[in-house]
Amino acid sequence: MRVFIADNDSDVVDYLKQIVEDLGHIAVGCTDSKNFTETLMREVFDLVILDWNIRAADDISLLEWMNKTLVTRPPVIVTANRSAKRDIADALHAGAEDYISKPEKRNVIAARVNALLRGNAACGAFDTEVTYGAYKMNRMEQSVTIHGQTVILTAKEFELAEMFFKNTDRTLSRHYIMQTIWRTTATLATRTLDMHISRVRAKLALQPENGFRIFTVFGYGYRLESAQ
């Protein structure tokens, strides 16, 4: 899973990244609010660890921005050098799922991160079938049915198709796709990505008449767009 860490102290970012990576997850960090919002607009994460003071103003407006802007907002852990109950309540009321007062022990942070990632992964985990317009995806059989016709996909093709449907109308970077599906950004995976997307596009007939189209965003990545 992917965790986005935002803190104005680069040493804290490195410390939290190490904890997340030791848990077996992918960690991405930033140290300013502009990079924070830009990254969230173009990439997808399973959890965000957000420092209360990453902006010059002492507020939690970034949480409010996430709630208003992101179609699917990941769970958020707010971190801060304060432990007053009012501060904790303010963060939770603004939408944060958890609050960590600095400094905190490594094992406690790891436990909090794991708890939220498990909860996020469990959402919809028991839904064998998911429908996106005319497409019905069967996770057990790794197949997709469209207009009564069943299409069998390979494991990677199914993962790729489900990723795009979950992020309809959102541009996904090549880096994000390769990191999430293949756990790498190597050159070989780049060629493999192009081939798999071509196959998914053809097998699922991702054309406007079927409600979706997938296209290349030159120099960046791919986008599945709703044509309805």
Image: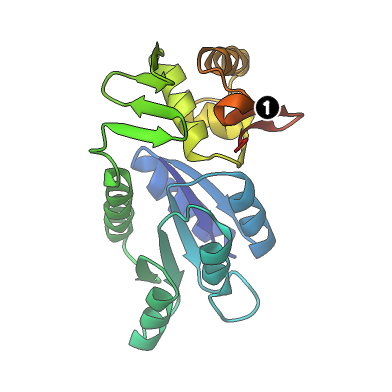
Instruction: Give the percent coordinates (x, y) of residue 88.
Output: 37, 79
Q: Quadrant of residue 107?
A: bottom left
The residue under the point 56% across, 34% down is 176
Q: Quadrant of residue 158?
A: top left
Residue 97 shows in the view: yes
Q: Which residue sits furthest right?
A: 218
Quadrant including the N terminus:
top left
Instruction: Give the percent coordinates (x, y) of residue 51.
Output: 51, 67
The residue under the point 45% across, 75% down is 94
Q: Is residue 117 left or right of residue 192?
A: left
> Which is more toward the observer, 6 or 37?
37
Instruction: Give the percent coordinates (x, y) of residue 101.
Output: 38, 73
Give the structural element (helix, strand or loop) at label 1: strand
> Which is more toward the observer, 79 or 95?
95
Q: Is residue 152 left or right of residue 212?
A: left
Q: In the picture shown, does residue 66 fall above or below 30?
A: below
Dot 1 alpha-carbon crowd within 10 angstroms: few under 14, some 14 to 19, many 20 or more: some
Q: Is residue 72 left or right of residue 56?
A: left
Residue position marked by numbered label 1 in the rendering: 215
Q: Amino acid at mark 1?
A: Phe
Residue 183 shows in the view: no
Instruction: Give the percent coordinates (x, y) of residue 53.
Output: 56, 74
Q: Which residue sits furthest left?
A: 126
Q: In the picture shown, does residue 41 fall above or below 86?
A: above
> Which is more toward the observer, 101 or 188?
188
The residue under the point 59% across, 20% down is 186
Quadrant including the C terminus:
top right
